[in-house]
Amino acid sequence: QVHLVESGGGLVQPGGSLRLSCAASGSISSINAMRWYRQAPGNQRELVAAMSRGGSVNYADSVKGRFTISRDNGKNTVYLQMSSLKPEDTAVYYCNDDIWDYMHTYKTYWGQGTQVTVSS
């Protein structure tokens, strides 16, 4: 069994910063792509940032230059450093990993989500 647990969300003023973390645990052999999605009320879930195991990254246009995704493969953890936050960044943020487990099963897992609210 594999679990993803996010942390680091909260309330921040416009222009502020937050760092999200997502730790994967369980019967993990290796993790390929690690991603962050977000979903605001009334909107579809959208991809914010993604990082391959080799370090290739891509970002949504709306966050380029403000958000940075990184990962620590030894800790099975992905991070999202968010800076210059705007009210429109308010959403529930979810991590999403492609994981090989010890039973040689390949599956995409989701975290439970962490709320980020940008407001004065």
Image (tube, rainbow, N blue to C red):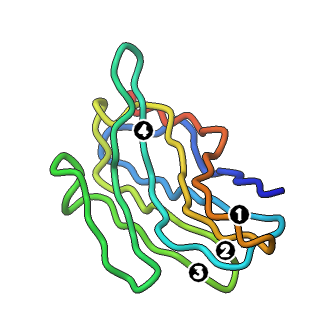
Q: Earlier in the sequence, mark 1 or mark 4?
A: 1
Tell me if label 2 and label 4 are in contact, CB under 8 Å.
Answer: no
| Mark 2–mark 3 distance (CA, rounded to whole Å) | 6 Å
* Depth order, front residue of 44/22: 44
Judge depth for marks 1 and 3 and give the one in front. 1
Specify the quadrant of the image occupied by residue 4.
bottom right
Residue where numbered disc 2 is placed: 76
Disc 1 crowd, CA 10 A, few/some/many (<14, 14-19, 20+): many
Q: Residue 54: horizontal and vertical position, in percent?
A: 41, 86
Residue drawn at x 28%, y 51% is 84
Name the amino acid type tagged 2: Asn
Q: Residue 12: horizontal and vertical position, in percent?
A: 46, 39
* Depth order, front residue of 111/87: 111
| Mark 1–mark 3 distance (CA, rounded to whole Å) | 11 Å
Tell me if label 1 and label 2 are in contact, CB under 8 Å.
Answer: yes
Residue where numbered disc 4 is placed: 38
* SS under mark 3: strand
| Mark 1–mark 2 distance (CA, rounded to whole Å) | 5 Å
Disc marking residue 24: 1
**Apparent side of residue 7 relative to residue 10 in the rendered image (left or right):** right
| Mark 3–mark 4 distance (CA, rounded to whole Å) | 21 Å
Residue where numbered disc 3 is placed: 72
Disc 3 crowd, CA 10 A, few/some/many (<14, 14-19, 20+): few
* Depth order, front residue of 84/104: 104
Residue drawn at x 41%, y 54% is 17
Name the amino acid type tagged 4: Arg
Name the amino acid type tagged 1: Ala
